[in-house]
Image (cartoon, grey):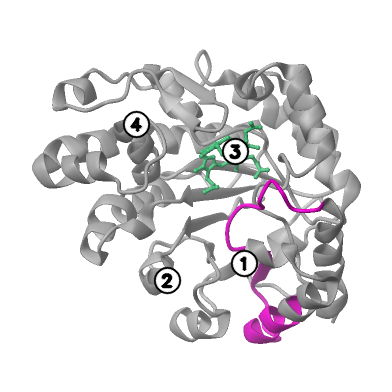
C-alpha cells in the first residue's frame, strides 16, 4: 500500500502491518472537554452552524492535534446530519441532546422520506472533509464517519435519545416491513455518504453503531449487522490512485458478536471495555484490526492508574500487528485535558517497538 502520509501508523495498523508504536486517536477527541472547542462553538452560535462551516469545523478538528501527539484526525461533524438532510429537523437542546421536530413513526412517514443529495443537502460535510484534508497537509490521516442505519433509525423513530428504545423496538416487532424499509433507505444514503467522503479526501472510515448492543443477537444480525454488511460491500475502498480506505465497524456493547462483525470484511472492529482484546483476538485472529478499548472513566483517575490501564490493554493485545488504541466510547465532557496527554504519551511510550 502506498501512502503519502508523514504518519501512517493508523493505516498500517488497520492493514495489520508492523508499526514502530501503537497508533492512538480518541472518540470525540474534538469536543467539550477542550476549552478551545467551547470557545469556537460559542463563536459558531449553534452546534449545527459549527458543522456547516468548513472553516470552523476544520479549526475544531485540528484543536486536539495541536495539544496531543495523536495519530489521526476525525472529521468534525455528527452522525445525525443524514436524518437532518432527510427532513427530520434536527435541534440540539441544551441539557437534552439531539431532538427531531419530525420523527418518523409510521410506514407512511417512512415511505415519504427522501434520499438526501450528497451535493445540495450534504455538500457542507464534503467541504469540511476537503478543507480539513488540505489543512492536515499529509501529516496524519483523516477519518470520515457515519452512524449505522440501526443507530440512525433509533434517533429518527424515538425523536431523540432514549433509555428503553420503546418506539423503535415497537416498530421492529409490530411492523418489521416498515423497519426494513427505513433501514434500507438509510443503508443506501450512508453508503453514498461514505463514498462521497472518500471522494472528498477521507483516508479511513468509521461506522458508529452506538445502539446495536441493545438488540438480541438474532435481531442484531437482522436489523443492524445486515445493513452494515451492505455498506461494507458498497464502499469504494480502493482509490483510483492505488491507496486503500479501511473501514472500522463499532457496535457499542457488541463484543460478543466480534466474529460476525469480522465476517463482514471490515478492516477493523471497535470494542468497548466490557471485553478483553486477547479473548476477541482468539476468536477473530488477524483477519481484522482491533480498536479500543479503555473505559473513558479511567481518565478521571490518577496518572499512574491511567498508565497501568494502558499497559494492561497493550499487554492483552500482545506484540502482534493490528491494534489501534482508543477509548471504548467517546471521551466525557468533564475530563481534565491534561489527562489526555498522559494517556496519549503512555500509549506511545509503552508500545515503542
Ligand atoms: O469524534 C469527534 O471528535 C468527531 C465529532 C463527532 C461528534 N459526534 C461531535 C459532537 C462524532 C464522531 C460524533 C458521533 C456521534 N454523534 C455519535 C456516535 C458516537 C457515540 O458517541 O456513540 C452519536 C450517538 C451522536 C449523536 C449526538 N450528537 C449526541 C447524542 C449528541 C449530544 C451529546 C451530548 O453529550 O450532549 C451530539 C452532539 C455532539 N456531537 C457534540 C459533539 C462535540 C456536543 C455538542 C455540543 O458541542 O454542544
Pick the quarter of the image with the C terminus: bottom right
Q: Is mark 3 within 8 Å of ligand 1?
A: no
* Nearest-to-viewer mark from 4 and 3: 4
- Image: magenta residue range: 310-336
In percent of width and height, residue 46 lies at: 65, 19
- In the rendered image, residue 119, in percent from the top left (x then y), is placed at 53, 17
Cα gap from disc 4 to disc 1, whole angstroms: 28 Å
**N-term mark: 3 or 2:** 3
Q: Quadrant of ligand 1?
A: top right
Residue 255 higher or lower than 313, as above or below: above
Mark nearer the viewer, 4 or 1? 1
Residue depicted at x 20% and y 22%: 111
**Mark nearer the viewer, 4 or 2:** 4
CA distance separating discs 2 and 1: 18 Å
The residue that mark 4 highlights is 156
Question: In the rendered structure, are the residues bearing label 4 and label 1 in contact, judged by CB atoms less than 8 Å apart?
Answer: no
Tell me if 172 is positioned left or right of 159 in this view: left
Residue picked out by circle 2: 258
Going from N to C along the chain, the mark reached first, 1 or 3, is 3
> Nearer the viewer's eye, disc 1 or disc 3?
1
Q: Nearer the viewer, mark 3 or mark 2?
A: 2
**Pointer 1: what residue?**
295
Residue placed farthest to the top in the image? 120
Q: Which mark is residue 198?
A: 3
Could one spot residue 247 in this view of the protein?
yes
Residue 39, located in which quarter of the rendered image? top right
Give left or right: position of 342 versus 229: right
Q: Which residue sits at x=32%, y=52%?
A: 224
Q: Residue farthest to the left?
A: 174
Amino acid at each position: 500500500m502506498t501512502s503519502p502520509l508523514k504518519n501512517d501508523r493508523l493505516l498500517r495498523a488497520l492493514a495489520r502491518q508492523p508499526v514502530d508504536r501503537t497508533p492512538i486517536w480518541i472518540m470525540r477527541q474534538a469536543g467539550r472537554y477542550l476549552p478551545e472547542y467551547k470557545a469556537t462553538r460559542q463563536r459558531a452560535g449553534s452546534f449545527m452552524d459549527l458543522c456547516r462551516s468548513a472553516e470552523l469545523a476544520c479549526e475544531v478538528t485540528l484543536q486536539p492535534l495541536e495539544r496531543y501527539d495523536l495519530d489521526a484526525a476525525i472529521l468534525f461533524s455528527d452522525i445525525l446530519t443524514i436524518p437532518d438532510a432527510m427532513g427530520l429537523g434536527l435541534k440540539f437542546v441544551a441539557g437534552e441532546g439531539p431532538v427531531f421536530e419530525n420523527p418518523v413513526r409510521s410506514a407512511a412517514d417512512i415511505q415519504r422520506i427522501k434520499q438526501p443529495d450528497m451535493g445540495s443537502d450534504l455538500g457542507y460535510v464534503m467541504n469540511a472533509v476537503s478543507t480539513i484534508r488540505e489543512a492536515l497537509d499529509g501529516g496524519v490521516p483523516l477519518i470520515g464517519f457515519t452512524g449505522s442505519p440501526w443507530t440512525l433509525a433509533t434517533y429518527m423513530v424515538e425523536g431523540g435519545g432514549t433509555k428503553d428504545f420503546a418506539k423503535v423496538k415497537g416498530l421492529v416487532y409490530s411492523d418489521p416491513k416498515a423497519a426494513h424499509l427505513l433501514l434500507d433507505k438509510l443503508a443506501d444514503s450512508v453508503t453514498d455518504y461514505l463514498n462521497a467522503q472518500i471522494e472528498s479526501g477521507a483516508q479511513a472510515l468509521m461506522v458508529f453503531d452506538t445502539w446495536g448492543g441493545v438488540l438480541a443477537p438474532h435481531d442484531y444480525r437482522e436489523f443492524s449487522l445486515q445493513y452494515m454488511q451492505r455498506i461494507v460491500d458498497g464502499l469504494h475502498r480502493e482509490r483510483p490512485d492505488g491507496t486503500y480506505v479501511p473501514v472500522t465497524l463499532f457496535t457499542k456493547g457488541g463484543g460478543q458478536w466480534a466474529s460476525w462483525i469480522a465476517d463482514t470484511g471490515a478492516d477493523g472492529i471497535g470494542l468497548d471495555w466490557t471485553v478483553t482484546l486477547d479473548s476477541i483476538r482468539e476468536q477473530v485472529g488477524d483477519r481484522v484490526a482491533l480498536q479500543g478499548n479503555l473505559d473513558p472513566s479511567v481518565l478521571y483517575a490518577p496518572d499512574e492508574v491511567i498508565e497501568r490501564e494502558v499497559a494492561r490493554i497493550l499487554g492483552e493485545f500482545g506484540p502482534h500487528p493490528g491494534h489501534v488504541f482508543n477509548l471504548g466510547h467517546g471521551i466525557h465532557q468533564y475530563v481534565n485535558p491534561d489527562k489526555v496527554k498522559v494517556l496519549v504519551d503512555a500509549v506511545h511510550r509503552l508500545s515503542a517497538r
